[in-house]
Amino acid sequence: MSFRARHLLGIEHLAPDEIRAVLDLADRYVELNRRTEKRSDVLAGMTQINMFFENSTRTQASFELAGKRLGADVMNMSVAQSSVKKGETLIDTALTLNAMHPDLLVVRHGASGAVNLLAEKVNCAVLNAGDGRHEHPTQALLDALTIRRAKGRIHRLTVAICGDVQHSRVARSNLILLGKMENRVRLIAPPTLMPSGVQEFGCEVYDDMKKGLEGADVVMMLRLQKERMDGGFIPSEREYFHRYGLDAEKLAFAKPDAIVMHPGPMNRGVEIDGTIADDINRSVIQEQVEMGVAVRMACMDLLARNLRARRGAAAAEVMA
Amino acid sequence: MSTYITNARLIDPEALTETTTSLLIDGGLIAEIGGPAPEGAAVIDANGKCLAPGIVDMGVRIGEPGDRHKESFRSAGLAAAAGGVTTIIARPDTSPAIDTPEVLEFVTRRAREASPVRILHMAALTKGREGREMTEIGFLLDAGAVAFTDAEAVCTNTKVLNRAFTYARSLGALVIGHPQEPGLSAGSAVTKGKFASLRGLPDVHPMAERMGLDRDIALVEMTGVRYHADQVTSARTLPALERAKANGFDVTAGISIHHLTLNEYDVGDYRTFFKVTPPLRSEEDRLAMVDAVASGLIDIICSMHTPQDEESKRLPFEDAASGAVGLETLLPAAMRLYHQGGLTLPELFRAMALNPAKRLGLPQGRVAVGAPADLVLFDPDAPFVMDRFALRSKSKNTPFDGQRMEGRVIATFVNGQKVFDAAP
């Protein structure tokens, strides 16, 4: 087994063979999830805590289901309304939970790097469920699995990532993963929503969506993150939709068999035309949600194996 | 009474020379250089180590009043003595701000009682550093303020600033600006570029610094005030500074030692001890700044000593407090520039001692007969590993923690009195 990581904090720290290990295992969990009898016991006896400092429905549900299908005891904490309001620091919250001996800690936080900070203070495996504008590794892995199943490979593809790249952790994790797997990544955004220095990551940068989509195998749309914006980045939503919203006319520039992806939740009529999102011949948006549960099961399974191995080694040392 | 230091490698920042010679301290002054030992003098054999004018550190934040748990005059003074800093130029960004003669008199008295090294005070340029009304610049000058600054609070009302500059000009006061366009830099934690994008942190283009300096220089041209930019850290800002100097304006600029020795990538995995204001720049910028100090375009190197307690740094990067302590690490960090060959020892002490003293009209910063005997004896090659908990500052937020450094202070003298001895 080639997955060596202790935590899953970002794609940045994963090697290509580790990414492949996650996808291969996730493929098996997709099969399990399609059965009526979905239970596995690989996490039996383990405790998983989902700690969401930012509100989330989809990701939290996906992690909860993943943990439960693997037999873990899952607890959800909506930290947004609890002790943080009373002035407790992130580190104290982490230490408090750590004292309850969780084995897997799933964390989402609004500040970039907050999950890294927390991971330094606990001795369980930490999964980053999104930190600020930094990374959202399970999203990139589920996107990779979706692409691999639709296209038969996850290398030498042309992938266009379109929309609010600046505020998107999904875009960051995806462009790192796709780069590591040797794909051609194009970023398409109005210049006000394009982060600086991205050319140095080996991406091609476009502000004309039609040019950017030309010959693309995969069209990955991003949500316009209105809640992370501190002022006007675009003149209006209708102008944004006109220039950067995915409709049939713009999609025609991509390859005829190009797939359309969106991490959700969608703003229909802002970044994507509803008919495109619902087109079962092009859109894989529902598959992405399905792959999400399987990828999260795979990640937690692999991290739990490493956790057991490490604890086993520590115990052997004590006995010796 | 008198002290005779022999066999010293004397660093002269005025002549830009290094010579092995002796130096006699008498009556708090440098009495003779290169003469014989007089009878009855205490003799110190420097063993060929360096003797330089004590550092004049322009822009040190001390927590009195308001944040004494972060740094007191006592702890700052002890840290300074151990770091070869003989004159602290304290910032007025305290709580409350040093914006009245009464507060200035209070801190002057507290500093004199508590600190082994000389502490001089800057005063706020506007009341409460709020950028609305100028302070009593005349009274504050009479009470001993050496310069006027709102520190990192940038006054956005140019009408107010124009009046304050005009009034300061009539009194010959030095004003210190923080060149930054606050609208552009609001909310930012790192410098714009690949690293910022990789870490997903809010960023600011270094041009915000240039815009701030351009505005201030326009006001200098209007008013004729004596102006110093506290930190010029980006190559983009240098042409504006160069032009201002070429036009004959009374303008100088400084830079913190952190911007000369570290770059944006040192932040690594969100290490908050590397969060400073302005944020650390690119390696190209850093190298351009070292050259600018060598050429004299940037006049002054300071520590920008900003103590922060543990709790204000144990936070996600965006939320963490900004600033790093530097009184004790300024000299060893500066030795990195010497060992890397970017700057000579006389050039370093020109920027750390002579130029700040000259800018503030102080007699310190020189090794000349008749100058105050504010001196530092140090070994530029002595290696050590920085342990932040060994620092004398109350706050331990140094970015150099755990790093290999070279350069240790052997002894520090203020007015001829030994205020620090590494081997007591």
Image: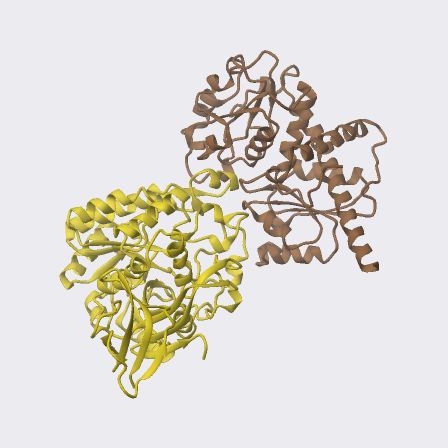
Q: Is residue A165 above or below residue A102?
A: above
On-image quarter of the C terminus of chain B: bottom left
Residue situated furthest left in the rendering: B170
**B16 and A82: which is toward the camera:** B16
Q: Position of residue A281 (x, y in %)?
A: 65, 14
- Seen at 48% across and 66% down, the residue is B395
Q: Is residue B132 visible?
A: no
Q: Position of residue B80 (x, y in %)?
A: 39, 70
Q: Colour of chain B?
A: yellow
Query: Residue B209 versus residue A274: which sits nearer the camera?
Result: B209
| Quarter that holds the N terminus of chain B | bottom left
* Image quadrant where residue B89 sits: bottom left
Q: Is residue A310 left or right of residue A11?
A: right
Query: What color is chain A drawn in?
Result: brown
Looking at the image, is B226 positioned above or below residue A130? Answer: below
The percent position of residue B343, horizontal first and vertical second, equals 33, 54
> Which one is nearer the viewer's eye here, B333 or B186?
B333
Left or right: residue A164 compared with residue B177: right
Kindly identify the residue that appears in the image at 52 percent across and 34 percent down: A225
- Residue under the image location 27 percent in, 47 percent down: B213
**Residue A192 sits above or below residue B118 on the image:** above
Q: Is residue B248 visible?
A: yes
Way the structure is coloured: by chain
* Among the 4 quarters of the image, the one containing residue A39: top right
Percent coordinates x, y for residue B141 in the rendering:
21, 69
On the rendered structure, is B387 left or right of B116? right
